[in-house]
Amino acid sequence: MMEIKIKKLNEKAMLPSGGSAKAAGYDLYACLEEDTLVIAPHTTALVGTGLAAAIPEGYFGGIFARSGLASKQGLRPANCVGVVDADYRGEIKVALHNDTDQPQKIADGERIAQLVVLPFLAVSFQVTDELDETERGAGGFGHTGRK
């Protein structure tokens, strides 16, 4: 099991936790100044977790929606998937967007997103005049049809 160092930036911050023994994501909790944060309809609020982390080199922390929060309250990460880079040492924050027509509330200590630690490949980009041919070619955006 990989160990990730976590620094509490606020004494009431809660450590990420898994919902079950085999859960891929670790819940992130809101660490608010007030008891409740209201997110107006169709707006985004930056919600702190009170935590900073040292993600190991070669990995990143992907911040994904919690399915219950998205389906029941219409709240999801504004950028759909957030990225915590291995060299970032600031507070982990979640930009929560309210997709509904009603104000939505987040309570201090509420689970707001999930963190999944994933490997990535470092690459370099090479400019070229030619790309190899494939069967698909340049077909995209629905080129295979709907059924």
Image (cartoon, rainbow, N blue to C red):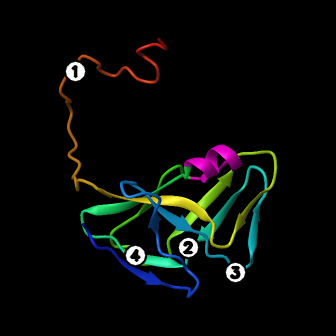
The residue type indicated by label 1 comes to: Thr
Q: Earlier in the sequence, mark 3 or mark 4?
A: 3
For disc 3, the marked residue is 33
For disc 1, the marked residue is 134
Question: Decide: marks 2, 1 in contact (CB < 8 A)?
Answer: no
Q: Earlier in the sequence, mark 3 or mark 2?
A: 3
Mark 2 and mark 1: span between their CA atoms?
A: 45 Å
Percent across and percent down for residue 108 are 67, 73
- Which image quarter is the N terminus in? bottom left
Question: Decide: marks 4, 1 in contact (CB < 8 A)?
Answer: no
Mark 2 and mark 4: span between their CA atoms?
A: 11 Å
For disc 2, the marked residue is 49
First to last magenta residue range: 67-78
Mark 3 and mark 4: span between their CA atoms?
A: 21 Å
| Image quadrant where residue 113 sits | bottom right
Percent across and percent down for residue 49 are 55, 73
The residue type indicated by label 2 comes to: Thr
Question: Decide: marks 3, 4 in contact (CB < 8 A)?
Answer: no
Q: Earlier in the sequence, mark 4 or mark 1?
A: 4
